[in-house]
Amino acid sequence: MKQALLLVFGTLVLASCQHKVKNKNSADQETTVQDSVQEPTKPEETERYEPVPPKVTLDTNKVPSDAIVLFDGSNLDNWISSRDSTAAKWHLNDDGSMTVADKTGDIQTKQNFGSLQLHLEWRSPAVIQGENQSRGNSGVFLNNRYEVQVLDNNDNPTYVNGQVASIYKQHIPLAMASVPSGEWNTYDIIYHAPYFNSTGDKIKSGTLTVIHNGVLVQDHVEIKGTTEYIGWPKNPAHGKGPLKLQDHQDNSRVSYRNIWVREL
Ligand code: MG
């Protein structure tokens, strides 16, 4: 009898907890709320009028009104050298772009970000120089550690998990969608940061979605850890971090323009 009562009590507590969790999730992200187990009989019963999504407009450069503009071609004020936190030393060009200055090192944003939507445009040099990983190599590092590869892959084969739009040495892109060398590519990236518990263990992996020139090339893939040149991915706990652009140290003069993010 005592055991039966304990079982009933435990079931009630569990049901209560599940109800609370369900309600929290519903408030956060559900669009269809099942208030009743009864099947609705009128359309109004499944229509919701709030929260009203905020209105976002686009400017003439198609930058969303709620975006944080990190580079619009006018200056490098939002960026610093990753080496020593001094002013970014990349070339600021007259056409509204910036170009890696040879061996000056990576640059990164002053501001830290977690999950985000990122738009940027990049261009590998029209004059072909180098081959394999030494031709137009740069990279976009989310959270200062997860690289989406930038590479001139036109008639330039390399290992496919390190080719353009790969998640470096983790995920081969679904397609190779580059425009000809010397023309502008677009990357639209959705990054969801991983979660770590209080003791530093990863409890949920981060994810990346990449659209290259309008083509889906990474479809919500799991980030396995840091994108290492040598070795397996590592998973030290971290919070928000800067967005970093790579100087590959081999005179790969990649250019960037029109960089903005929306925090998620
Ligand atoms: Mg790279």
Image (cartoon, rainbow, N blue to C red):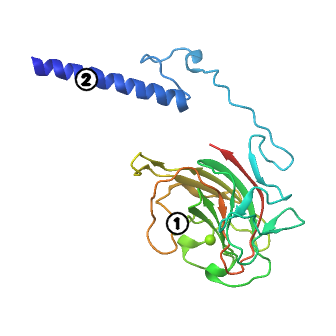
* Residue name at image x 64 percent, y 21 percent: 49
Query: Can residue 223 be seen from the camera position used here?
Result: yes
Q: What is the CA distance from the residue labelled 1 to the residue labelled 2?
A: 45 Å
The three-letter amino acid code for the residue at tag 2 is Thr
The three-letter amino acid code for the residue at tag 1 is Thr
On the rendered structure, is 234 left or right of 244?
A: left
What residue does disc 1 label? 227
Query: Percent position (x, y) of residue 118?
Result: 68, 52
* Residue name at image x 77 percent, y 43 percent: 64
What residue does disc 2 label? 11
Residue 204 position (above or below residue 244): above
- Name the foreground residue: 94 vs 58: 94
- Name the foreground residue: 87 vs 244: 87
Query: Percent position (x, y) of residue 124?
Result: 74, 73
Could you tell which of marks 1 and 2 lies nearer the N-terminus? 2
* Residue name at image x 40 percent, y 52 percent: 201
Label 2 residue SS? helix
Q: Give residue 253's quadrant in the image.
A: bottom right
Q: Report the image quarter containing ligand 1.
A: bottom right
